[in-house]
Image: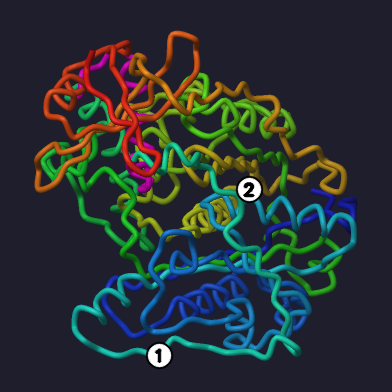
Amino acid sequence: MDWNSVADNTPVLVGAGQVVERGVTDDSPMTLAAEAARRALAHAGGSNVLAAIDTIAVTRLFADSMGMPPCPFGRSDNPPMSVARAIGAEPSHCIYGPVGGNDPQSRIIEFAGAIARGERSVVLLAGAEAIRNQRNAVRDGRELDWSDTFDPANFPLEDRGWGELFVTMQEVHNGLLAPMSYYALIEQARAFAADRSTQEQRSHMAELLLSLNEVATANPYAQFPDTLTAEDILSADSLNHLYTKRMVAQDGVNQGAALLLCSVAAARRLGIPPEHWVFLHGLAEGAEVNLSEREDPGRSLMAELVLKRALAMASKTIDDINLIDLYSCFPCAVSSSADALGLPVDGSRSLTLTGGLAYFGGAGNNYSMHALAEAVSRLRESPESYALVATLGGFLSKHAVGVYSCQPSSLDCANADTQLDRDMIPRIPIDEAPEAGVVKSYVVNYKGGVPVQAIVIAETAEGSRFVANSIDSGAVAAVLSARRPGLAIKVTPGDNGALRFISA
């Protein structure tokens, strides 16, 4: 391979590091992120790489994300500088990313373009969660100090905040707060489309999840590597009418991951071997409309467009891809992307590099950093292979995809058209004061194993959408027994903008 012909401004991933603490320690998330960064630097090789880092970007912690309680043990007011201080780096630019599991992949897209344009040279991306340590310390009554303070005049931080929120107020007023409820609505719409009963859909999900669990059991960085059976998954505590506790992302983790991205010119200058270079072949990202506004609540058209764009940019089909990681916070996140790619979900082809958020670990907004680290490490071991990593945030809302290989890329990251416009996606209008409609999807939430509340996405005769909820036992039973969309409901106004429904 003629490495000398690769342009100096080509961005390459040159190092990846991961860390997991399955036991309980006093380590903070920034401690774990810093250790992952050290491992990424060691994985890169070369010399004087640490001193060359000009940018550190840290994935936003769950404790700093919307709807999450703050950490009782304090926090860093400049997470990138906490990592820098721990490893001895002196970056000129510190970035704290927005909320979303797409963020690590989105930052690679952003910084690859910046490197190609000569705006950056060596970028460290890192993130971690220590929620397991936090929860154990609280339960045991131990006091920890995870605070870290920096003078903003000397250590400026670009804090990107929460980012865009992918909800309507009607959704919120009717009880749609937890991601699990949103994803169950997506899952139920998919069950309707496949004409599956609740039990059939649960069995279908368990088959998919078993294939993820099998990967997690062999992954040394998995937080929950226990071998499960379908019965283990299905018989766990019910969270709603579809999901049990063993079907969803588990955030009680101590995990960190980091990546090192630089220009080929920097890699040459720092002596990073060409065999360590992982090239970017296809990159794309885009944001969906809100769930209740989607033409089909069981699909994300933007996810399909982003996957198609990334593969086309790489001049590859899915059959050319050897390594795949589809974001896996809930089963439908995997199955919807798999459907878009024409991939089976029966375990005959692996759809995860980690083992998935339910079994590898749902490391907050940073899970996909682990998927990307796995991709980099495995591509280095298999230089002829190609990897696709699909990430998402929100409720199948924000999508970012990358195609990678150790084979040199002709992609012009400085000018690549990576951003897809949301205006490409149809948006169904919302009716703020409906009187009646038919159910398009539903979730029934459980308390103590008993169904207590139903939330529906419904459609009026005029084709507008609305979200409503009910604690009426007859209404709950009616939606639970529905095998197909179209159950007729009547709606009355409730308190604080809520809509109450009963079966018509």
Q: Is residue 319 visible?
A: no
Secondary structure, magenta segment, majority class = helix
Q: Does the magenta stretch include residue 187?
A: yes
The secondary element bearing badge 1 is classed as: loop
Residue at x 41% of width, y 73% of height: 70
Q: Closer to the camera, 196 or 488? A: 488
Which of label 1 and label 2 is nearer to you? 1
Relative to 499, 33 lies left or right: right
In this view, 159 is above or below 143: above
Relative to 424, 174 lies left or right: left
Question: Residue tagged by mark 1?
Answer: 145
The magenta segment: 175-198
Q: Closer to the camera, 450 or 435? A: 435
Q: How crowded is mark 2: few (under 14 residues within 10 Å), some or many (20 or more)?
A: some
Question: Residue tagged by mark 2?
Answer: 383
Q: Residues within 10 Å of mark 1 (few under 14, many from 20)?
A: few
Give coordinates of residue 153: x percent, y percent.
75, 88
In this view, 47 is above or below 224: below
Q: Closer to the camera, 211 or 62? A: 62
Q: Which quarter shows the C terminus?
A: top left
Give coordinates of residue 21: x percent, y percent.
34, 73
